[in-house]
Image (cartoon, coloured by chain):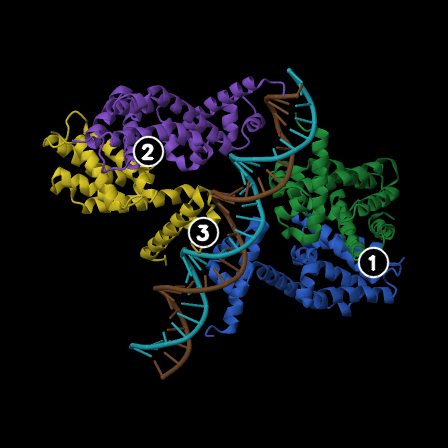
Chain colours: A yellow, B purple, C blue, D green, E cyan, F brown
DNA sequence: CAGTAAGCGAGACGGTACGTCGGGTCTTACC
DNA sequence: GGTAAGACCCGACGTACCGTCTCGCTTACTG
């Protein structure tokens, strides 16, 4: 009877992709009609998948969370030295482009809705910094939370450079890693 | 025009203050009616001072730019050693609270409208980093622009900690200064 | 087509019955979904029988036309004196309840679609009045068409009384017959 | 501050006029947008005057009630003999055209909303028939209510003739009066 | 008795009207 | 003369219904 759940999910994903593109092009001003048209579906159908604009946006955020979480998980942060962990983290996050920025910009709004963000993104990062402080590689005078915020800030700042097309991903990640480690490592 | 220009400017400033509060409380969703009501004036009057919502927002940004520029100017960055300059810069910016974040968040949008931002905020900072690189105190392998972005990012990240009420202004500025200088200074 | 045409017709008739009830209860506002549910069938099936709402309504009208025509035919208007003809007509029409009202309400809309209405309902009535005028039993100063309209009006007015439950069919028909004959008969 | 109530009422009346025309032309299918456009105003403004379609329609009905009531009142039914009263009533009602038909068609729907209809239209008519029965001019075997319904029916039937352009107002009213009085008068 | 083609319920879809709301423009009556 | 109140137009939002379509399932006819 019901469209197989798989098909529904695939359609929803296609809509999210299309919506992301449209919103990126037209900015926040894009109307639901525009988004639906860009996705090649009717406005009514769009509303059948996402009950309102807010839900659509947060579904897009959830997709970003998933991608980001996947990259962080495959980075295997827990099983490498701190230095290497920080380097991988920088590459993983910067590789997702501005999704990390978009997410942490209103993390307050979405973290309630998407516990995955905390569980699969924030936590592994915090754990890395905790481990670094515990084993003496990272400065003990800065709490892990603060180091997390500073590192996130560095990433976001670096992404501004990337966005301007001034530097590539590898180069950007290297700059972040280098500055953060020099700044936060002991000795 | 009977009302002296001074009076008009003062009224506009009062509206901006009130609007800033309202927008911070209710978020971007606050309607022009809400803002006008919070300012104790009619919607029509609000429109007489600011022709549209966009102008109001950018007037708020301009006010932040002015405050920020004032703090940076009085920091006298050009006449102190790099280390001290960075420290003063961190204190100046963090002292303005989230205004710097709000501004650089959509600097793309406002920098066209508010050349002051570039001229009085960005440029002095860039000059500091240039001088640092030139006199050998700051790493030469990272362009001044990148150091600027990274420093800005650190500030923003640190402000997230401040916002959560975890740390005070001085402490936050000290953390930023310490990490940035260790990370970007030579040797 | 496997299902015998007879069966199809019977199903259609059942749907019409059910739809008539539903529409009477819920008024014109009843949705096609409501009607289908009331008929115990799916909406798709309803559309298989009637291509759109308009067709369903006009099929209901056609059914009313058929019932009304049958009653009028079995009244044998042509073979009885005018007085008796008018009396039988009143009983026949009032016996069908509000169907006559519904039909003549938008006879303009349906008479094109349902020539039966004119041929099998209007015409026999008109013929009766024509015969009455011709043989001197009915007033010659009122054209048959006008007498037809007036008689129809009386019926409808009387049905309002019946609808309110104030009077039975026989009594109502008697009132109509009595007033009309006194009013339209010669001498 | 507020648009003077008079002005508002006048605007509302203009909208009703325009809406009546549009609805008559395009039928019940006319959208609120069509109606607003025909009235030369925006859809939002239309909704400011009438909260929804139903209210607009019933305001149109109310206007008809007022016109009808005015005509009936100026007919002075209570101060003339029954015969003359019936004749005046017929002329008054037929003079309003189909408004009476539209109103009594769904009097059930509107009589709750517009008590004026009962008080200023139905009651004077009923009173006339009551007086006729009481003073022996009208048949006692038909209750006043029934006579009211029959008379209304005659009017509506006659209006069908008028609508077809077959007869003028005076002539139509004369036919109704003549048939009704012959049919319902004593002797 | 098994295969098959029909009719069916369920429901997704595009489209359109409804009623609501906020933005921006304008007029009108006050102070 | 500037201000507050608010009427107005426009366009987006979210909802509901219409008419179309496609899916599996059932059922009843056929080989």
Q: Residues within 10 Å of mark 3 (few under 14, many from 20)?
A: many
Tell which residue pokes out farthest to the left in this image.
A135
Badge 1 sits on which subunit?
A: D
Q: Is residue B133 visible?
A: yes
x and y percentages locating residue A7 in the rendered image: 34, 57
Q: Residues within 10 Å of mark 2 (few under 14, many from 20)?
A: few
Residue contact between numbered discs 3 and 1, judged by CB atoms under 8 Å: no
Query: Which label is found at residue D166?
Result: 1
The residue drawn where x is 85% and y is 47% is D186
Label 2 sits on a secondary structure element that is helix
Q: Nearer the viewer, residue B143 or F8?
A: B143
Q: Nearer the viewer, residue B130 or D125?
A: B130
Q: Earlier in the sequence, mark 2 or mark 3?
A: 3
Q: Is residue C66 above or below residue A47?
A: below
- The residue that label 2 is drawn on is A108
Tell which residue pokes out farthest to the front in this image.
B135
Quarter the N terminus of chain D occupies: top right
The residue drawn where x is 83% and y is 67% is C131
Badge 3 sits on which subunit?
A: A
- The residue that label 3 is drawn on is A36
x and y percentages locating residue C84 in the rendered image: 77, 63
Q: Do circles 2 and 3 both sit on a common chain?
A: yes
Distance from the alpha carbon under mark 2 to that under mark 1 = 76 Å
Label 3 sits on a secondary structure element that is helix
Q: Is residue A156 above or below residue B38?
A: below
x and y percentages locating residue C92 in the rendered image: 69, 61
């Amino acid at each position: 009877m019901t469209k197989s759940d798989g098909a529904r999910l695939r359609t929803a994903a296609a809509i999210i992709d299309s919506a992301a593109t449209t919103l990126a092009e037209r900015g926040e001003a894009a109307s639901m009609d525009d988004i639906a048209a860009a996705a090649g579906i009717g406005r009514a159908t769009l509303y059948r998948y996402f009950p309102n604009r807010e839900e659509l946006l947060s579904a897009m955020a959830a997709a970003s969370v998933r991608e980001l979480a996947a990259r962080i998980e495959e980075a295997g942060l827990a099983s490498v030295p701190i230095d290497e962990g920080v380097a991988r983290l920088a590459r993983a996050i910067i590789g997702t482009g501005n999704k990390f920025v978009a997410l942490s910009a209103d993390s307050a709004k979405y973290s309630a809705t998407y516990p995955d963000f905390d569980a699969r993104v924030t936590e592994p990062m915090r754990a890395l910094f905790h481990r670094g402080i515990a084993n003496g590689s990272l400065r003990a005078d800065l709490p892990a939370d603060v180091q997390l915020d500073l590192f996130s800030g560095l990433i976001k700042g670096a992404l501004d450079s990337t966005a301007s097309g001034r530097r590539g991903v590898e180069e950007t990640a290297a700059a972040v890693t280098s500055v953060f480690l020099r700044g936060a490592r002991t000795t």
